[in-house]
Amino acid sequence: MQRAAPQEFDRVLSSMCTRPHPAARKAAERFFATNPGDPATYQAVAALEEDALSYLGDITGLPAPHGYVTSGGTEANIQAIRAARNHARDDDPNVVAPESIHFSFQKAADVLDVELRVVPVDDDYRANVAAVREAVDDHTVLVAGVAGTTEFGRVDPIPELTAVAHDAGALMHVDAAWGGFVLPFTDHEWSFAHAPVDSMTIDPHKYGQAVVPAGGLLFRDKSVVDSLAVDTPYLESASQASLTGTRSGAGVASAAAAMRELWPDGYRDAYERQQANADWLYDELRARGYDAVEPELPLVAASVPDEQFDSLRDLGWRISRTASGELRIVCMPHVSRESLRSFLSDLDNLRSGPARN
Ligand SMILES: *Cc1c(COP(=O)(O)O)cnc(C)c1O
């Protein structure tokens, strides 16, 4: 019987996952039989989680952050809303977010029984601050902005949204699940250092090059994260703030290892290489007459006819679309210029039609 093999990354162009850094892979293998859900028993991995948090604090401009390494951006976003809801003790809570928010917010609103108010974005796919201001009220417990949207790689006006949130007596959450490891090398205002943001999602298992599962959730104030804690009889540790119980020490150890290896120079190199790839791909697509969205971060969206899109998938390219139908190419660390050239050459062959081949 043949052994199953994981996919190669060569033709993966729309995923936000990537090849883990070798040091992250090695750390994951060493720590996979540990459980940071019970830090008093699994003390070595608990110490690595402290390291990981401290790196995440450096990256996001927050000295001494509170929080933990989650199973991913979904858990982090659910927990950010849960913390805001518990902290506010409101009997009819709502969360206000732009329509560009990740679909994990729909799950969060559903499991937490919180109303999600989604407001329009502007012409450049960023949160519309006036629309957010219009939507908040006395029952708003959280305003969320995205720093690096999943579909177009846009960064919401975080300082302005934070002011709206705090004026309404709500907390401010930034979802930098994907963008958090590239934004430090840009001029965007997105971090704890740029505004009095209360919480943030940032995923080591995306641009951080850790193995899956490794997400990150950070809080500025201890009292907010404390509102997540439940007592844990029959563990060595007395309480737990995570949503999952037993969780992977592999993700935690790999996140710490990846950041030790790559922050800041390795991440800067990856960002610069991939931003150049995205800018190049954008120019090439435009030169061929495609409507494309200018890449602010290493992510290109372009309108490609269904037939060409489907044929590219049939050729083995792993690509997906935005909700409004654009092809999206996420320039993750594994994406090479050579692979993008080969993608464009397949596209050119499709455009010229089989007759000319
Ligand atoms: C990927 C992503 C998420 C979800 O993260 P998972 O790790 O897939 O659970 C949330 N928000 C944003 C902006 C993302 O890009």
Image: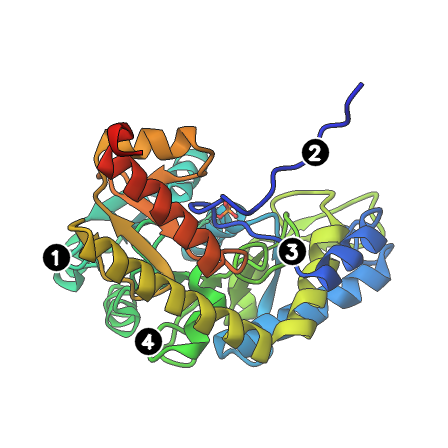
What's under tag 2, amino acid-wise? Ala
Snapshot quadrant of residue 166: bottom left
Q: Return the residue nearer the eye: 347 or 145.
A: 347
| Whole-percent x, y for residue 121 in the image | 18, 54
- Residue 218's x, y, as percent? 53, 65
Classify mark 3: helix, strand or loop: loop
Tag nearer the camera, 2 or 3: 2
Of marks 3 and 4, the one in the foreground: 3
Question: Mark 3 or mark 4, which has the lower sequence index?
Answer: 3
Question: Does residue 110 appear left or right of residue 325 in this picture?
Answer: right
| Disc 1, SS | loop
Near mark 3 (Cα within 10 A), the count class, few <14, some 14-19 or many ≥20, is many
Q: Which residue is mark 2?
A: 5
Q: Do the numbered discs 4 and 2 sit on residues whose CB atoms are within 8 Å?
A: no
- Find residue 123 and name its label: 1
Q: CA distance from mark 2 to mark 3?
A: 16 Å
Cβ(mark 3) to ligand 1 < 8 Å? no
**Amino acid at circle 4:** His
Nearest to viewer (mark 1 / mark 3): 3
The numbered disc on residue 187 is none
Give the CA distance from mark 1 to mark 2.
43 Å
State if disc 2 and disc 1 touch (CB < 8 Å): no
Q: Give, as a three-letter code, the residue at label 1.
A: Asp
Q: Quadrant of residue 260?
A: bottom right
10 or 80: nearer the viewer: 10
**Which residue: 70% across, 33% down?**
5
Residue placed at 57% from the left, 80% from the top?
Answer: 265
